[in-house]
Image (cartoon, rainbow, N blue to C red):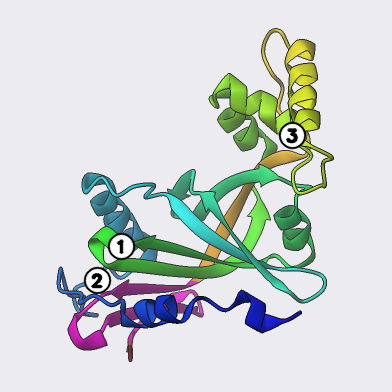
Amino acid sequence: MNRSSFDLHHDMKLALADLRREYSRASLDANDVASDPLQQFAQWMEQALAAQVPEPTAMSLSTLGTDQRVASRVVLLKGCDASGLVFYTNYLSAKGTELAAHPQAAALFYWPELERQVRIEGLTEKVPAAQSDAYFAVRPRGSQIGAIASPQSAPVASRAVLEERYAQAEAAHPGSVPRPAAWGGYRLNPDRFEFWQGRQNRLHDRIAYHCTGGQWIIERLAP
């Protein structure tokens, strides 16, 4: 591949290099955070919701493929409690097959309006079928049909093919829509957290948690 063919225009490259902003909204200290990182995360999520941050539950999920390549995509957080973070997907999708082979995953939340990000790492596991059933039942009908129609991550010949699959699935389910067996939830069980608060002069606050012997250890990291 000829890399030069993908180079940005010289003036644009200079403009990108010049883009920067100072962060000054808040600070973060290890003495002020919750002893449990899930509690700290819940506090920050509540503040993001209160601030009406666009898509506050959107998180970049990174997984490891059988070819040892790391893949990332954005998914939506649909549950958070003392057990971990829950999201839903097709178990036969790329992320599903990757998690089946390598259950370790990493999630990233970025809220630029609050000058904050949260990194979370841990092992994933499927949630119980009853939990997936309960969530699927409250999804909009269109999303339910879409979950049946879409062979997520598989190649499709055209948009028309996908729409035809949707129409067939819709016709086949005039009433309630059952959850597909290959669709359901995962729980990310965290063992590492990092809370990042932007600060001036790039001296950002980074407070990390890692679990050792069932206890959360808190430390500050250099920016």
- Say the numbered circle drawn on residue 112: 1
Q: CA distance from mark 1 to mark 3?
A: 34 Å
- Amino acid type for the residue under numbered disc 3: Arg
SS assignment at label 3: helix
Of circles 1 and 3, which is in front? 3
Q: Position of residue 170 (x, y in %)?
A: 73, 16
Residue of label 2: 33
Whether residue 28 is in magenta: the answer is: no
Q: Nearer the viewer, residue 127 or 17?
A: 17
Callout 2 amino acid = Val
* Residue 36 visible at all: no
Q: Furthest-top residue in view? A: 174
User: Residue at point 57% right, 68% down?
Assistant: 122
Lower position in the chain sequence, tag 1 or tag 2: 2
Vertical arrangement, residue 140 with respect to residue 96, above or below: above
Asked whether residue 109 appears in the rendered view, the answer is yes
Q: Is residue 67 above or below residue 185?
A: below
Amino acid under disc 1: Pro
Residue 31 occupies quadrant: bottom left
Considering the numbered disc 2 on the image, is that residue within a helix, a strand or a loop?
A: loop
Residue at 53% across / 70% down in the picture?
121
Name the residue that disc number 3 marks: 159
> In whole angstroms, how far apart are the C-alphas of marks 1 and 2?
20 Å
Q: Quadrant of residue 219?
A: bottom left
